[in-house]
Image (cartoon, grey):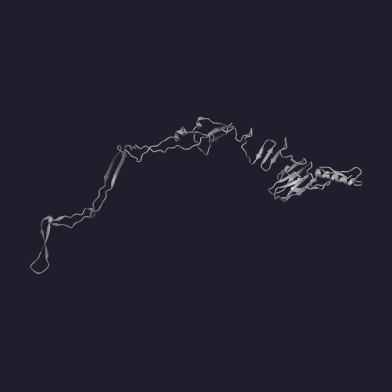
Amino acid sequence: MASTYTDSLKLELMETGANANTWGNNTNTNLETIDAFNAGYLAKSVAGSSNVTLTTANASPTSEASNKVIEFTGALTGNIYVFLPAVENNYIFFNNTSGAYTLTVAPDGHAANGVAITQGAHTIQYCTGDTIVDLFANSFGNLSVKNQIKVGDNITLYANGTIATTNLVGNGAGLTGVGEFASGTEALFVQTSAPTGFTTNTNATLTECCLQVVSGTGGGTGGSDTFSTVFTGSKTASATSVPFNIASLSISQSLSAGAHTLSTPELAAHTHSSPIKVTPFTKNWRGPTQAQLIYGSPASTPTNATGGGGSHSHSLSGSASLSGTLSSPISASIPSMDLKYADSIIATKD
């Protein structure tokens, strides 16, 4: 009878009396196959976008599926499947491919039961015959470490309880005993009530109190008028002019004008009358007419006009003072200051 082979490792089961003079070679091949399945390493290129099926053969330590550790390499250009023999076995895989595509390991003929391996990750998977199970995919019950666990490039979990991370997402509703604010921290909230973990501060000093931003030490309070008292309601009056009452004002002064002598141009234009009358007469001989002076009426002969009517000034010296009170019966006009606002609360961390 011919030899048969095991399902998982493909070892040769030799028939009694068969394989005369080849038992040594056949046994060595079986041992080499066992060695490969337990410690063999294979670097397998799966570049491209086509599915890949690992080779397998009876009693073959060189078959691709006969290796314990398999590293997938190459640049992916599409999502692919890597198919294993659909028999019970276990492997260590390393997805060392590049390209933004997935690599899924599945039993041959059972693509729907495969498991994808994250790019750059190592994992341990075993095949049940028609299904791949990944030991690192939600399979651990309890996990204990001595130093740290790194999750990608973002989170490091240390054995002393410290979590180092560059990015946290979520509202933390499921966390207990974890606080992002120290107890006693006060914060302002624009909502109806304090959030979980905070208690509303009901101090009367803070009720209806505006906020003042300071560059120094905060926490101080001041003033006494409430927000609604100052900024709500009508506070209007009107006046189109501003009358002033000066009835009670008086002026006292002690002033004197300086002397000034008028010059001719500053005098008013005028004439003077003369008591001398000038009349012409003619001798009996031929010659020019002569004049003779005789006294006559003063109004009969005025002098030539003089004076220019020019302006002049006097210096003024002394002092003056204003005393009394000045009052205005005006009423000021103040616009309504019914400001928009949002009710806020100040809460203290429990």
- Residue 320 lies in quadrant: top left
Q: Position of residue 187 (x, y in %)?
A: 55, 35
Above or below, 194 against 131 in this view is: above
Please say if 330 is above or below 96. Answer: above
Residue 209 on image: x %, y %: 49, 34
Q: Residue furthest bottom?
A: 286
User: Which is nearer the eye, 155 or 112?
Assistant: 112
Task: Report x, y in % for residue 40.
Answer: 80, 45
Q: Please state, as top left, top right, bottom left or bottom right, where the C terminus lies in the image.
A: top right
Q: Nearer the viewer, residue 257 or 269?
A: 269
Quick check: 105 left or right of 248?
right
The location of residue 245, given as percent across then percent down, is 32, 38
Side of 303 where 324 appears, left or right: right
Q: Nearer the viewer, residue 188 or 81?
A: 81
- Viewer-proximal residue, 112 or 37? 112
Rendered residue at 31%/40% (across/down): 321
